[in-house]
Image (tube, rainbow, N blue to C red):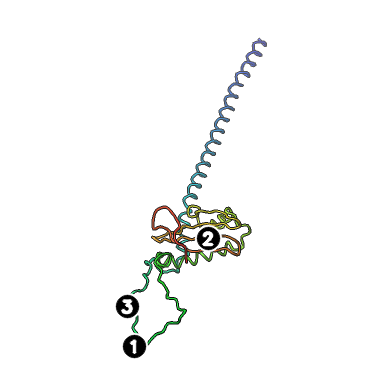
Amino acid sequence: MRRIAASTSTFARSSRRPRLTLAITAVAVLSLGACGTEKANAGGEQSTRASAVGGQPDTAFTAMLDTLAQSCPPSAPPEAPPSGPTETLPPGSVETPPSDAIEPIAPTAGPEVELNARDWCASALHEERIAQALWNLVDPTPAKVRTILNDLGYVDERIHNLKQSGATTRFFLDLRDKGGRLCLEGSAAGEKTVVDKCVAPASGPFTHGDRKQ
């Protein structure tokens, strides 16, 4: 009888082990599943966050343009060069121009006649802030110039032809907004840095046009 009892007890103990093993395995599977779900959720949140950040630059860029130009006049069309009858002199008066006088010629193309009032005003503000930021840049490589432009709020999509030539890095900025045609041409060269306004097409892909004379 003792042998039978011992055998029954041994069987009972051995039958519990598979159940315990199965229970541990199930808990492990559930833990792994929860961990995977957690990672998936984290990944989803990161993707959503990244996608949201990816959508911000255009909005931030437009806001920067608006803030910079808030003190400028509305986007009125450029004024045409003055025209009309010449001023007549009183009878008996004779005007003798100086021998070295040069008659001014009204511009017919370029920023003076193709940029509206808002763009003409904003261009000076853009020129000043960019030139100041690049003035003390040591070894102005394209990567360094791009970083500074990005820090000022100019997004990569609006930076064009960023190239280095010797100790100078040249670039163009597409600043077209609200129907304007403003663009900037810059050359980063330390204390010889120059930033000038130029004219871009009214629509379509960016190409730089006439530079400020």
Residue assigned mark 3: 85
Give the distance between the C-alpha atoms of the residues marked 1 and 2, in whole angstroms: 50 Å
Determine the image quadrant of residue 164: bottom right
Q: Secondary structure at mark 1?
A: loop
Amino acid carrying label 2: it is: Gly
The answer to whether residue 41 is above or below residue 3 is below
Up the image or down, 169 lies above or below 83; here it is above
Residue 1 position, x and y percent, is 65, 9
Q: Nearer the viewer, residue 116 or 25?
A: 116
Measured as percent of width and height from the top left, residue 177 is found at 42, 59
Q: Which mark is residue 34?
A: none
Write the residue at 33% across / 89% down. 91
Residue for point 44% across, 68% down: 72
Circle 1 crowding by C-alpha within 10 Å: few under 14, some 14–19, many from 20 = few
In the picture, measured across the screen, residue 80 lies left or right of residue 138, that is: left
As measured in the structure, the alpha-carbon distance from the residue carrying label 3 to the one carrying label 1 is: 15 Å
Position of residue 1 in the picture relative to residue 68 (left or right): right
Residue of label 1: 90
Q: Check disc 1 and give the amino acid type.
A: Pro
- Residue 65 or residue 116, whichever sits in front: 116
Residue 205 location, x and y as percent? Answer: 42, 52
Return the residue nearer the eye: 2 or 94: 94
Look at label 3 and name its amino acid. Answer: Pro
**Mark 2 or 3: the one toward you:** 3
Disc 2 element: strand
Few, some or many residues within 10 Å of mark 2 (<14, 14–19, 20+)? many
Point out the frontmost of discs 1 and 2: 1
Q: Which residue is mark 2?
A: 186
